[in-house]
Image (cartoon, grey):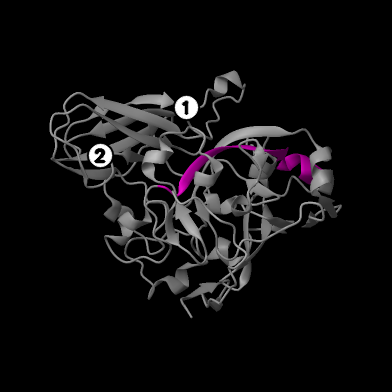
Amino acid sequence: MDVLHGLVNGMKVSDEKVHCDYAGDPTRSSELIINSKKPFNAETPGGILVKHFVTPVDLFYVRNHGPVPEIDPKTYEFSVSGLVGQPFKMSLAELQDSANHVTISATLMCAGNRRNELKDIKPVKGVGWEIGAIGNAEWTGVPLRDVLEKAKIDLNNPRLHVEFVGEEDCEEITKYGSSIPLSKAMDPKGDVILAWAMNGKPLSRDHGHPLRAVVPGFIGARSVKWIKEINIIDGESQNRFQQKDYKLFLPSVDWDKVDELWDKSVPISWLAVQSAICQPQNNEVIPKDQPYSIKGYALSNGSRIVRVDVSLNSGKDWQVADIVHQDKQEQKGWENRYWSWSLWTLNVDKFPSPCTVVCRAWDICSNTQPENAASIWNLRGVMNNAWHRVNVKGA
């Protein structure tokens, strides 16, 4: 039993976990890096990430909190209820017939991506991720706003949130749930969808079959899989995964001090500007003075990445990398909504091994990354977007 205490709405809660049966989980690619077998959590190797602008489904990172549900799409349905004028239930077939189908390219990233760098500074709680808890895909479904319009919601109430509850039975003795502001859900430029397909094929079980939410620009925790309920509620979801798991605290806050702060801290929603070096890997051996291509990814929360800087001497001097693949949203008429990552390359004629390679990204709003991970350490180990560093050894 794993127990951790905190306060949610003034009530003492614990992270008591129960035994779950994982015998029915699907098979996965052997190329994934497994960080936890039960529940299954695995990331994509960096070298694979930069080979594909659209990440193959079987190589897309997996973040689960319990056994993977097995749902028959023929009998599946979800409900829309709560503070609505007209609650209803809808099957997958009815959903697919209810609105225009859309396909969006969007990157999902776990809030714990790069957690291990924070763990190296001081212990944190959570799955240990390197740089691969991220992936970019083409998602097909219907706009969430089209579905919610049928529920007759008071769109003038600024407090309303859309809560998603999934079918997943989590080890934390709850269904997985989360919420987003109604304003994001109803924004035509917010591009929130209920998706049934990924890269042109029905969702795999690990990625939410038969239906999931996709919330572009937000941390992956808000794109709930295996949708069971959509509830319109007054304020944020009270589910533990909204109120407890994904919150930021000062570096000085530890588990002895956090109890009084849970209610005062705002749950994470939007992603921060981020970049990482995927090639070379940390401690890779590269012969001195040979040509080499440094590669990586960068993203923001819907803003275009305009520059990626790379240093070969621990951040003393910088060069500008080439952005080799990025959304061409101007061709879609999306008015600068860049929900996908950017892939970048810096070609080096003579690699100065040994050395420390560093990268940082800038978006169109001039947001960039903090220099040191120690300045943003937090006990949950989330939202690490410090300069990414890779040590390279000489041959």
Residue 197 is tagged as none
Q: Nearer the N terminus, badge 1 or badge 2? A: 1
On the image, the x and y values in percent for residue 363 come to 41, 32
Residue nearest the viewer, comparing 112 with 59 = 59
Q: Quadrant of residue 296?
A: top left
Using the image, determine if residue 379 lies above or below residue 30. Answer: below
In the visual, does 321 lie left or right of 54? left
Q: Residue at x 39, y 73 (%)?
A: 255
Residue nearest the viewer, comparing 4 with 352 = 352
Give the structural element (helix, strand or loop) at label 1: loop
Q: Which residue is mark 2?
A: 358
Q: Which residue is mark 1?
A: 326
Which quarter of the rendered picture does the C terminus lie within? Answer: top left
Q: Residue at x 60, y 50 (%)?
A: 207
Give the structural element (helix, strand or loop) at label 2: strand
Using the image, determine if residue 60 lies above or below residue 84. Answer: above
Tell whether position 141 is magenta: yes
Q: Are marks 1 and 2 in contact (CB under 8 Å)?
A: no
Span highlighted in magenta in the image = 132-149
